[in-house]
């Protein structure tokens, strides 16, 4: 059975499954996609919209499937 804990994420108390906490980047396609560049601004409209959703709702949302994924070379 999974266990959960609450912690402060960017100033908001959130809940996470203990085994998944902090693993967003290793699970999310975006961080391996050529259409995504968070340091200079995302070129990806899907990532930009998902980020705004995440900010509004204080969530973390890894992408597992994407129609415009382009593997980084």
Image: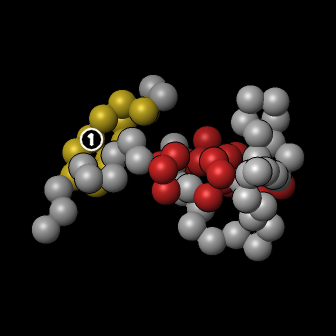
Where residue 65 sits, quadrant-wise, is bottom right
In this rendering, does residue 40 appear at all? yes
Measuring 49% from the left and 56% from the top, which residue is drawn there?
A: 27
Measuring 27% from the left and 41% from the top, which residue is drawn there?
A: 6
Q: So how many labels did they put on this image?
A: 1
**Secondary element at tag 1:** strand
Q: Give the x, y percent position of residue 16.
A: 32, 50
Does residue 9 appear to the left or right of 63 in the view shown? left
Q: Which residue is mark 1?
A: 6
Q: Give the x, y percent position of residue 24.
A: 48, 49
Answer above or below: position of 47 versus 67.
Answer: above
* Residue at the top extreme of this rendering: 11
Q: Give the x, y percent position of residue 51.
A: 67, 47
The colour scheme used to paint the residues is secondary structure
Does residue 53 appear to the left or right of 72 in the view shown? left
Say which of 44 and 34 sits in front. 34
Q: Give the x, y percent position of residue 11.
A: 45, 26
Does residue 62 appear to the left or right of 48 in the view shown? left
- Which quadrant does the N terminus fall into? bottom left
Measuring 74% from the left and 29% from the top, which residue is drawn there?
A: 39
Local crowd at mark 1 within 10 Å, few (<14), some, or many (≥20)? few
Say which of 22 and 70 sits in front. 70
Measuring 72% from the left and 36% from the top, which residue is drawn there?
A: 38
* Residue at the front extreme of this rendering: 73
In this rendering, does residue 59 appear at all? no
């Amino acid at each position: 059975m999974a266990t959960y804990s609450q912690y402060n994420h960017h100033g908001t108390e959130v809940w996470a499954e203990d085994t998944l906490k902090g693993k967003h980047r290793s699970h999310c396609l975006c961080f391996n996609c050529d259409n995504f560049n968070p340091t200079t601004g995302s070129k990806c409209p899907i990532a930009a919209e998902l980020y705004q959703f995440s900010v509004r709702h204080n969530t973390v949302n890894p992408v597992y499937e994407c129609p415009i994924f382009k593997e980084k070379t």
